[in-house]
Amino acid sequence: MMVGMRPQPALEFAGDAPSGIQRPGPGERREALCPMLDGTSQAVTVAGWRQAGGRWQCLLMWGAWGTIEAGWYLYDDRLVPLGGSA
């Protein structure tokens, strides 16, 4: 990881936030532990759901107060298990 870059979820990026928010989605919970591209795991909040091309996308938010990051990611229940079924 490069110095000064914030960790990003290890999910496929699907777009900047926010747009097209829908609820409910495939998950029962809103908080999860998500693997990041730098090899760490971080607590994330699932702030919304949408479907595109037949696949669920989740709006993830993570970080600390004042440095909150957000983005849409293709949902993968193997990496971010939230319960429920898609």
Image (cartoon, grey):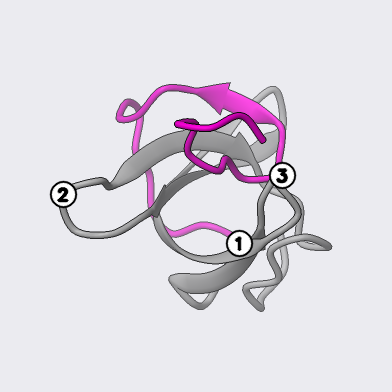
Circle 3: element type: loop
CA–CA distance in space, label 1 to label 2:
29 Å
Q: Residue at coordinates 35% horizontally, 41% vertically from top-left?
A: 69
Kindly report which numbered mark, 1 or 2, lies closer to the viewer in this rendering.
Answer: 2
CA–CA distance in space, label 2 to label 3:
22 Å
Left or right, 53 with reference to 69:
right
Kindly report which numbered mark, 2 or 3, lies closer to the viewer in this rendering.
Answer: 2
Q: At which x and y percent is residue 10?
A: 72, 44
Label 2 is placed on what type of residue? Gly
Callout 2 crowding tier (Cα within 10 Å): few <14, some 14–19, many ≥20: few
The disc label shown at residue 26, or none: 1
Q: Residue at coordinates 66% horizontally, 51% vertically from top-left?
A: 36
Q: Which residue in the structure is indicated by mark 3?
A: 10
The disc label shown at residue 67, or none: none
Q: Which residues are magenta?
A: 1-26
Q: Residue at coordinates 59% horizontally, 37% vertically from top-left?
A: 73
Closer to the camera in the image, 48 or 44: 44
Q: At which x and y percent is residue 5?
A: 49, 31
Callout 3 crowding tier (Cα within 10 Å): few <14, some 14–19, many ≥20: some
Label 1 is placed on what type of residue? Pro
**Looking at the figure, which quarter contains the C terminus?**
bottom right
Vertical side of 24 occupied by 81: above or below: below
Q: Which residue in the structure is indicated by mark 2?
A: 66
Vertical side of 67 occupied by 27: above or below: below
Closer to the camera in the image, 80 or 68: 68
